[in-house]
Image (cartoon, rainbow, N blue to C red):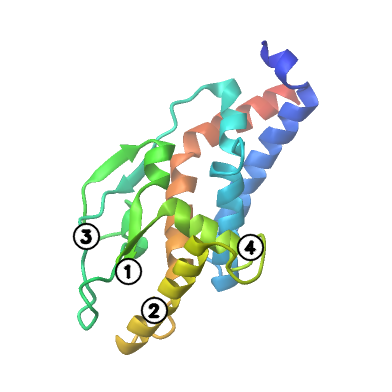
Amino acid sequence: MSRSAATSPGEEIDRRALFLRTLEEMRARIDGDQHDAIMLSALLRKLLIDGTPLLALVNRRFKQRVRFGVLLPRGPVALPSGPPEFWMVGDAIWPKVQGTFGPPAQVSLDEFLSMPIVLALGHKLTVRDVIHYGAHVHGAVHAGAPSSEKDRRMLAIEQWIGKVLKESRQPGFDAIATQLRSIGRVVVDSLGVLERSVQDSVLADS
């Protein structure tokens, strides 16, 4: 099926505009407060995970080989006063952070979403898990109590991490918000080439 038959010109323009607006909003929220960080989960879910993700819909035209630039963590690493079963990447997944651990890598979307970034209470949490949790439990999409066993486990992990950080004299640190910011930075940087191609195509069609 040709591109013109698959989607109407209006639908494609709307998708491109939505893609550009999504990245613009992500940039505005990445350096914001805790609420902004949690709202990133809804934008990330729409862009990378939901149904046929917005990234896939937009890239049907451009057919770019999208890769995500990350630092591969060498964990697990414990907090100085924390138990050895606790490990969290924090900002260290983002290559522009100075003095971080792990070799740089270019990974696919599936590899990126499957990357473990938190280890706590014997469970590994991936990029996908953190995005889902921020959207469905923290309230970026559906506020409320966790409805699945995985969400209940993540809530218990978040509460446990909060206790560990408080005991480590970091009581104001929000683990989920910090992870969402670092995920957002990786995504915005990695989609820069595609973003410029979309901008050029919108200008050409105007």
Camera-near label (4 vs 2) is: 2
Q: Residue furthest front?
A: 149
Which of disc 2 and disc 4 is earlier in sequence?
A: 4
Camera-near label (2 vs 3) is: 2
Along the viewing direction, whichever of 115 and 65 lies nearer the viewer? 115
- The residue singled out by tag 1 in the image is 120
Along the viewing direction, whichever of 187 and 120 lies nearer the viewer? 120
The residue drawn where x is 21% and y is 52% is 102
Packing grade of label 1 (10 A; few <14, some 14-19, many >=20) is: some
The disc label shown at residue 75, or none: 3
Q: How many badges with numbers are in the image? A: 4
Horizontal side of residue 206 vs 61, given as left or right: right
Where 126 sits versus 3, above or below?
Answer: below
Which of disc 1 and disc 4 is earlier in sequence?
A: 1
Q: Quadrant of the C terminus?
A: top right
Q: Are marks 1 and 2 in contact (CB under 8 Å)?
A: yes
Q: Amino acid at mark 3?
A: Gly
Give me the C-alpha separation between circle 3 and circle 1: 12 Å
Which of disc 3 and disc 2 is earlier in sequence?
A: 3
- The residue singled out by tag 2 in the image is 160
Q: Amino acid at mark 4?
A: Ala
Q: Quadrant of the N terminus?
A: top right
Q: Position of residue 19 (x, y in %)?
A: 63, 40
Packing grade of label 4 (10 A; few <14, some 14-19, many >=20) is: many
Packing grade of label 3 (10 A; few <14, some 14-19, many >=20) is: some
The disc label shown at residue 140, or none: 4
Q: Position of residue 106 (x, y in %)?
A: 32, 38
